[in-house]
Amino acid sequence: MVEQQPEQAGDVRNIRRFVAFVGVFLLLLSQFLVFSKEVIYGNLLFPPYFVLAIIGVVILVLSQRIPPNAFWKKLSQQAVFGDTAFWILVAVLLSVVTASAVDAFMAFRRINYIPVITVWLLSGVCYVYAFINSRTGFDSIKIIDWFKTNRNEILSVLLIMALAAVIRIYLLGDLPRVLDGDEGNVGNFARSSIEGVLANPFALWENFGALYLHLINLSMKFFGYNSFGLRLMPAIGGVIAVPAVYLFARWLGGRRVAFIAAFMIASSHSHIHFSRISSVAYIQDTWLIPFELYFLISGLEKRQSWRTALGGTILALHYCFYLTSQIITALVLVYMLILFIFYRDWFKERFSQALAFWGGFLVMIPPSFVYSYQNPNEFVGRLGSAGTFQTGWLEITMESTGQSAFELLLGRVVNAFLSLFYYPAIDFYGSPSPMISMISSVLFFAGMGIVLWKIRSPGNLLLLGYFWGATVAIGIFALPPSADSYRMLMALPAVVIMAALGFDQILEIMGIGWSQFRFAYTVAVSVILTSLLAFNLWTYYTEFAGRCRFATDLPGRFGTYLGVELQQTQHENRIYLLSNNIYFYGSHPATFFLSLRPVINFSEPIDSLDVIPGETIIAPPDRIEELEEWIRKHPGGQLHYEYDCETTILLSYQVP
C-alpha cells in the first residue's frame, strides 16, 4: 500500500503569498475607505466600498488554489516575488494606506486612530523583517543561549536601570513642588488629545508630537490627572535612555565604556531633573537618538541591512515626539555625505545598508509628512516663535551691536557649548550648577580629544558629529541663549559616552588599565562613579528640589497650589478667590490642568462678599491678611494654610 503524499506547494509559495496579500490589502483598504466617510443611514444593501471587501475575500481564498504547474512555478521564482521584495512591498503599501487614512480621518474628524497606528507600526516591522534572513533569523534557542552567555552584562544594565528608575520616580508627583506654565499646557493639551486635531497621532502642537501627547494622556488615565500622571512618561524616557546609551557606547568603546556611560546618564542631575518634568520633550531624545545612531553605525560596520533599516524607522518615529528629529535627519545626511567623500571605499561597500536606512525612514514618514504638508506652520512652529532667523533676532542684534552675522552666530554656538559645563542650568530648571559636574567635564574633554585623535573611525566620526551637530544647530537656529542648557540635553548621551571613553583611556595611560590591573581599575571606576552619584543626588535633591527654585515666579507657583486646593476640596458649594491683577483664576494653565472646577474671582473688598455656609474663600499671598481679619469676625469654619518653602502662599476658609 502506497501512502498518498501531501501536495508540495513550496514551488508556488511565493506567488500564493503575493496573491493572498493582495486580497488582505483590499480588505484592509475597504475598511479604511468605509471609515473615512460619514455614515449614511437608510435602506442600504451594503455600506460603501463593501464590494471591494468581497473581492478581497475572493482573491484571498483563490490564492490557495493556484496550481503548482510549470507556469506558476517559473513565475514564483522571479526575484520580485522573493522574501525581501515581498516584505518591502507590503511595508510600502501599508504605509501608503496609513497616510491615506490619516488624510481621510482628518477630514471627517475621526478620533480613534488605533487601527491606523497599528497598520503604521506593522509597515515598519515588515520593512525591517524584509532584511532578516529567515533561515538564520531569531532562533529561540540562539536567543536563550545569548541570554545565558551575557546574563551578567544584562543584569548590570538592569541594575543601572533600576537605579535610574528609583531616582526618577521617587516623589515624582511632589518634586518639583509645582508645575510651570509649559507643564500645565502640556497636560491640558494631552488631556484634549482624545478629540479634535490632536486625536491624529501624527499631528503637532508646538512641535510636540501628538503621539507623545497620547502617551502622556494614557499615563494620566491610569494614574490620574495630577503631577505624577503628567510626569511619568518623561521619567520612563529617562530610564530607557540607560540601555540606549549602553548599546551605543558598547559599540563604540566596549563593555567597560558602556557601563560607565550608562551609569553617568542614570545619575546625571540634569538628566534626572528633565526626567521629572514634562515642560520640554528633549528627555525623549536621550533614548531615541542613541538607538537611531546605534542601529545606523552597527548596521553599516557589520553590513547588516536590518539594523540600518531599524534605525531609519526609529528616526521616523522620532518625528512623533519632538522637532529634534529634524536635526538628526540633517545630521545623518551630512554624515553620509562625509562618508561618501572622505571614506568612499569603506562607504561603497555599505551603500546598500545606507539605502536601507533611508528606506526605513521613507516607509514610516508618510503619515507625518501628510500632516506637515497640510499644516506647514505647525511643522516649524517652535522655529517661528524662537528661531534665530524667523524672529528677526539676527538682524536686530546686528544693527544694535554692530557685530557681523558670523560673530553673532559663532557666539551663539559658543554659548550653547559653555552651557554644558560653565553656565548654571536656569531655564526650566533653576539649578546653580551647570548641566555636568567638574569631574564629568574633565573626562568629557579628555574623551573628545581621543575621539578627535581617532576620527578615521566612522563610529568616532558619528559620535563627534552627533555632539557638534546638535551644538551648532542649537546655537544657530534657537533662541533665547538662556534656553541652551536644557536644549543641550539632546547631546548629553554623546557627552557621557565621550566622558566614558576619556575615563577609560586616562586609566589606561596611567598604567591601571583593565588589561593591566583589574582590581585597581575597578576601584578607580567605583570611586569616581560613586563621587558622581553623590554629587548629582546632592545637586538635585538638596540644592534644588528642596529650595523652591523651579518656576520661581510666585504667581505661577500659586497656580499649582490653587489647582491642588481645588482638587482636594470635596464639597460642591461655590469657591471664591480674592483676586487682583496678579493673582486670579485663569492666569495659569496648571490650575486648569489640576482641577476643572470653576472658581469665582472676587476683586472687591472681602466685606462686600455675600457668602453662605459651606462655601469656600481662597486668598493668594497679597490678600491673606485681609482674609485672616475677616475670619476673626466669622470664626468656626475650616481653615487651611499652604506653604511654599518659607512663603505662606495660600489660605482657604470654608464658611461655617
Image: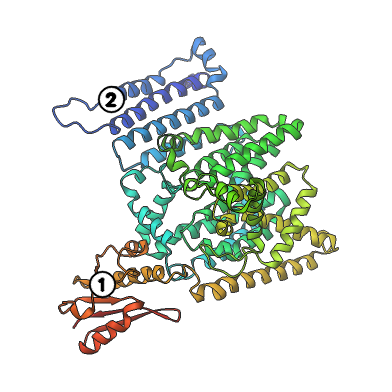
Amino acid at dot 2: Tyr
Q: Which of 46 and 372 is in front in this view?
A: 372
- For the C terminus, the quadrant is bottom left
Residue under label 2: 49
Q: Can residue 3 be seen in this view?
A: yes
**Quadrant assignment, res 481:** bottom right
Residue 43 relative to residue 79: left or right: left
Q: Nearer the viewer, residue 201 or 478?
A: 478
Residue under label 1: 603
For the residues marked 1 and 2, what is the alpha-carbon distance in whole angstroms?
61 Å
Residue 369 relative to residue 608: left or right: right
Q: Position of residue 49 (x, y in %)?
A: 28, 25
Q: Which of 167 and 383 is in front in this view?
A: 383
Q: Look at 67% across and 41% down and name the residue there.
A: 297
Q: Position of residue 263 (x, y in %)?
A: 64, 62
Q: Look at 42% across and 65% down and name the residue there.
A: 179
Amino acid at dot 1: Ser
